[in-house]
């Protein structure tokens, strides 16, 4: 074949003969090549606590494991739409089964919805800092992300988000409780926001941590679906239900929006064992929600003790807390790691720490007064006076 008149990529060989990851041998979308790979929470050694991925510290329920034992037909493809699970969720939320869409984790549903709504030349608006997958999911669609800074207390600045919506905006993502700050959007704030945005604009309310919320004023998107046809609510079995390893999330919303998401989905991504475990979890929901209550109590006690030690941190409503350690973030994360607490640092910004085992909470509390006392004055995590 004659060579085409275009810049050619060099085959990126490095001295040991392997291919350089920065120099692909074929033409790829530059904005995709430039994306950082998804950064998973650091693994922990057997003597350390993994508090870096907001996982559920409880072991799976015996009844869920028993249901998985019966999942033997793995030589067959799963039911592509996970109908039995959709019907169960539809009954729970009093919607039709077609108003429920299951994905391999809620992050997959987010990707589908963004692909359905936004493309090159469009914009997607969201608060920042928030879930670290948002920027790359938006970039993959070809659209441009518009990041609106969080309020000083870690919450969404919904009036500023509304002010950033323009002719090119095709979707808005609202995250409550927000990962990583733990702050909620209140029902009043959300309804004021919905009244201010165009009613043909897709609003995705990411409620991955909804079950941990104890603040009665927090928004609950599942109660608002009938009022707002442009709203899609995302929930997951990964956090409160402890099924992160099986990848099951769900979207609730109008059929026409979910059908568009279904059209962008990679078929058959939700596995039979995943759907079975989710159904078994719903059958044993009371037991799981009792664990959620224990985690929320542990979180609230930890927050109160940290505040008493001199920390200034947002009131957490998910299964994690946020230490806004600013420039000292990497140092503090290293000190925690030395003590066996593997956390999620966002350098120069802060540390997200999952509410794990009680022993991990105690370890943190043993060091917290000393750490906060060593932060320089003016560090955002240190309470004044
Ligand atoms: C805010 C938020 N949304 C969505 C997800 C994705 O969860 P999953 O894909 O496991 O359902 C996460 C996971 O950490 C999250 O923090």
Image (spheres, rainbow, N blue to C red):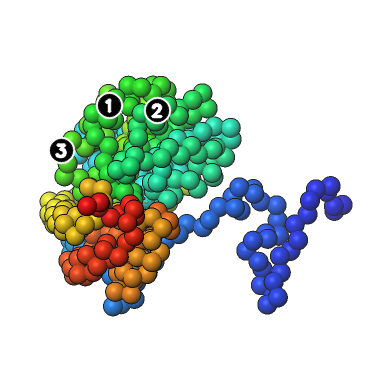
Q: Horizontal and vertical percent for residue 87?
A: 26, 40
Question: Which residue corresponds to the image point at 30% horizontal and 73% vertical from the top-left?
Answer: 340
Crowding at mark 1 (Cα within 10 Å: few <14, some 14-19, many 20+): some
CB under 8 Å between discs 1 and 2: no
Using the image, determine if residue 265 lies above or below residue 353.
above
Q: Answer left or right for 103 relative to 2.
A: left
Task: Mark yes or no: residue 80 visible.
Answer: no
Splitting the image into 4 quarters, where does residue 67 fall? Answer: bottom left
Q: Which residue is mark 1?
A: 191
Q: Horizontal and vertical percent for residue 190?
A: 29, 30
Q: Residue furthest right?
A: 2
Q: Marks 2 and 3: which is nearer the front?
A: 2
State which tag comes first along the sequence, 1 or 2: 2
Disc 2/disc 3 C-alpha distance (Å) = 24 Å
Q: Horizontal and vertical percent for residue 382?
A: 28, 55
Using the image, determine if residue 173 lies above or below residue 198.
below
Q: State yes or no: Cβ of the residue under disc 1 lies below 8 Å from any atom of ligand 1.
A: no
CB under 8 Å between discs 3 and 1: no
Q: In the image shown, does 306 or 42 lie closer to the viewer? A: 306
Q: State yes or no: Cβ of the residue under disc 2 lies below 8 Å from any atom of ligand 1.
A: no
Instruction: Give the numbered dot on residue 216.
Output: 3
Q: Horizontal and vertical percent for residue 225?
A: 28, 29
Crowding at mark 2 (Cα within 10 Å: few <14, some 14-19, many 20+): many
Crowding at mark 3 (Cα within 10 Å: few <14, some 14-19, many 20+): few
Q: Answer left or right for 346 relative to 293.
A: right
Asked which secondary structure carries label 3, the reply is loop
State which tag comes first along the sequence, 3 or 1: 1
Disc 3/disc 1 C-alpha distance (Å) = 15 Å
Q: Which residue is mark 2?
A: 162
Q: Answer left or right for 22 relative to 63.
A: right
Question: Which residue corresponds to the image point at 25% horizontal and 51% vertical from the top-left?
Answer: 384
């Amino acid at each position: 074949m004659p060579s085409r008149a275009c810049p050619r990529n060099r085959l990126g060989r490095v001295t040991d003969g392997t291919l350089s990851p920065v120099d692909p041998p074929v033409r790829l979308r530059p904005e995709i090549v430039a994306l950082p790979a998804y950064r998973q929470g650091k693994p922990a050694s057997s003597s350390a606590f993994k508090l870096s991925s907001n996982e559920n510290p409880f072991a799976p329920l015996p009844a869920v494991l028993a249901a998985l034992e019966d999942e033997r037909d793995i030589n067959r493809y799963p039911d592509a739409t996970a109908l039995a699970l959709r019907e169960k969720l539809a009954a729970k939320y009093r919607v039709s089964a077609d108003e429920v869409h299951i994905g391999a984790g809620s992050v997959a549903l987010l990707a589908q919805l963004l692909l359905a709504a936004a493309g090159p030349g469009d914009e997607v608006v969201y608060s920042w800092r928030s879930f670290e997958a948002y920027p790359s999911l938006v970039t993959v669609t070809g659209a441009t992300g518009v990041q609106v800074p969080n309020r000083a207390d870690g919450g969404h600045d919904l009036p500023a988000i509304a002010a950033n919506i323009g002719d090119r905006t095709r979707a808005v993502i609202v995250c409550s409780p927000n990962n990583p700050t733990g702050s909620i959007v209140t029902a009043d704030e959300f309804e004021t926001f919905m009244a201010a945005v165009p009613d043909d604009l897709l609003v995705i309310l990411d409620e991955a941590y909804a079950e941990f919320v104890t603040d009665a004023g927090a928004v609950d998107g599942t109660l608002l679906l009938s009022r707002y046809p442009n709203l899609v609510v995302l929930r997951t079995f990964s956090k409160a239900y402890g099924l992160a390893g099986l990848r099951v999330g769900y979207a609730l919303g109008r059929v026409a929006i979910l059908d568009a998401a279904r059209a962008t989905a990679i078929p058959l991504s939700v596995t039979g064992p995943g759907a079975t475990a989710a159904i078994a979890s719903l059958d044993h929901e009371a037991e799981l929600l009792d664990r959620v209550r224990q985690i929320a109590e542990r979180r609230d006690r930890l927050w109160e003790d940290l505040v008493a030690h001199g920390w200034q941190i947002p009131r957490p409503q998910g299964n994690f807390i946020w230490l806004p350690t600013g420039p000292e973030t990497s140092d503090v994360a290293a000190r925690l790691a030395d003590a066996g607490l593997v956390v999620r640092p966002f350098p120069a910004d802060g540390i997200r720490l999952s509410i794990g085992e009680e022993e991990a909470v105690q370890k943190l509390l043993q060091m917290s007064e000393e750490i906060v006392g060593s932060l320089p004055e003016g560090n955002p995590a240190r309470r004044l006076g």
